[in-house]
Structures are given as C-alpha cells and as structure tokens.
Amino acid sequence: MTRNKAIIVDIKATTDSSLRPTQRLLTLSNYLSMSPKSYDEIAKFLALNTFFDQRVSALYIGELIETGVICVVGAFGWSTSEYNAFIDFPIDQKYPLSESIRSQQIVAIENSESFATDYPLMKIFSRSGRWVFNASIPAHPIGGITFYADEICEMDLETELFFIAVGSLIGLYASRLPLALVDVARKVRQEIDLPPIPLTDRQVVIAGLLERGFNNAQIGLEIGYSESLVRQETVAIYRKLQVTGRQAMQAIRRLKLHNEASSEEGQE
C-alpha cells in the first residue's frame, strides 16, 4: 500500500467467492436482525465489535437523501462539541465518504499532511484524539460509513471483502424502511411548511407529528419504530431546524396556523 496516499478499492474487482464470511459478519447480521435499532447504536456496535480488529476509535454513518446531501444519522466515539459541529454536506464536495458513495468504492487514507491538503473540508469532522487511518465504505442504498482507526489497516483482499460485506449489511438494514412511510413523508412534505433545511423522509414524518403535539412513544406507534430511534431523529430535527425542543415545534405550528388564518381573513 502506498503510504500517505488515498487508496481506491474497486468493489467490482473483489469478487473472490472462496472467502467465507467471518464470525464478526455473522454477529453483525444477527445484531441487525434484532430490529429496531438506532443508527447511533449501530455505529457503536460497528466500532466496538465489527471493526474491533481495526481498532476503530470513532465512526459515523451518513445517509444520502434525495436532495443530494449526506446527513450524519449515527455516530460513536465523538465528543459532544465534535458531534455538534457535524454538518450535512453535498455529495459533489470532496470528502472521503462522498467519494466512496459516488464511486461505490472503498476509500482508505492514512493520516498525514497530505490528508489535510487533499481533504480541506474534513476539518469539520476533525478528531481531538490521535488517529492514523481513515476508511469510508459505501452502504447502498443508505449512503456509507466512515471510521477513524488507531492502527494502519492493510487493505488485502480479505479486508476489502470484509468491508464490502459490512457495507452491504448496513445497506440491507436501511432498505427495510417501509415504502408506505416514504409515501407518507412525501404527503407530509406537501402539507407542512418547513425551513429549507434537508430532512430525511422519516424526519419529515416525525416533524409533522411533533408539530401536532405527539410524544416520542406515540410517534413510534404511529410509524412503527422504536421510541429510542424516534428520540434520536427528534434531536436531529431540532438541530437541523435550530429549535430547542418540542414546545418550539408546537410554537411553529401555532404560528403557521395563525398566519394562515390571518391570510384567509385578509382575502375576505
């Protein structure tokens, strides 16, 4: 492996079927089968279990939404200030994860001065602790995974196939999002007036229910997800809309209804 250079691993070229799934892949598969799980929980499991041999210290999962923006939907190993600094970034900007998703290839990079030069925008996702290796793995159709490791990871064929399989399992888990929920999201998007900040379809559904005063347990029953997942998505919605909580969401709803009523009175 060339040192201090980005490594591009072509998924289509790594098709050796003689390699058997490892026990960690089976464990990950079993873990994902016990749904529902939040993406934060999945990120934690990946870092502490699936990528244990890679000595991963931090990891995040990015979802590519229909607007062409990658949103961080789950993370582990970051301080509160680091996590709060995360931004949603366009797929066409130069990030290891965006390159991985666009090319459907693994992008593996060692920590060096060239990393900061090649990926200047990555300062948003900077780590306070020491790291020596970064890898981004596509996870179709959700988006991809990026992790930071404390050791150099030699990208041999077995490792490449392992990473590909992990991404495929995460993508398969994400594809279980019910189609009906996506349809509901589109209808809600037409009915509610949210600021022009990218929300996933699921977040649009939840935002609409938050405006109507539903609590997390009620939302979970309404859309068929766990309360912990709804709570995580609610926090993400508040962050993206820059509001402080449920009461703020309800205030937005009341203000919108007031404006609609005033508009109707002015037309009479």
Image: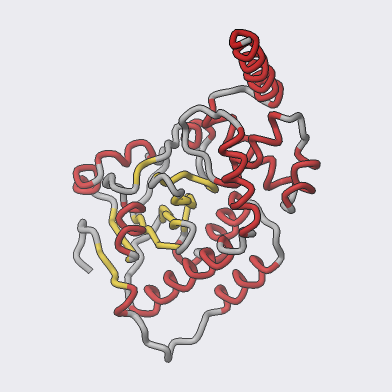
**Residue lying farthest to the front in this orientation:** 268
Q: Which residue occupies the foreground of this view, 263 or 28?
A: 263
**Picture coordinates of residue 240 (x, y %)?**
52, 31
On the question of residue 59 being in view, the answer is no
In this rendering, position of residue 169 left or right of residue 184: left
**Picture coordinates of residue 266 (x, y %)?**
60, 8
Which image quarter holds the N terminus? bottom left
Above or below for 256 versus 206: above
Q: Quadrant of residue 135?
A: bottom left
Which image quarter holds the C terminus? top right
**How many marks overall?**
0
Above or below for 120 versus 81: below
Q: Which residue occupies the foreground of this view, 214 or 120?
A: 214
Above or below for 89 versus 175: above
Q: Residue at x 67, y 19 (%)?
A: 257
Q: Residue at x 47, y 66 (%)?
A: 167
Q: Residue at x 64, y 15 (%)?
A: 255
**Picture coordinates of residue 50 (x, y %)?**
54, 66
- Is the image coloured rainbow, by chain, by secondary structure, or in one colour? secondary structure
Q: Quadrant of residue 90?
A: top left
Above or below for 104 versus 88: below
In this rendering, position of residue 83 left or right of residue 134: right
On the question of residue 96 being in view, the answer is yes
**Picture coordinates of residue 111 (x, y %)?**
28, 51
Q: Residue at x 42, y 42 (%)?
A: 129
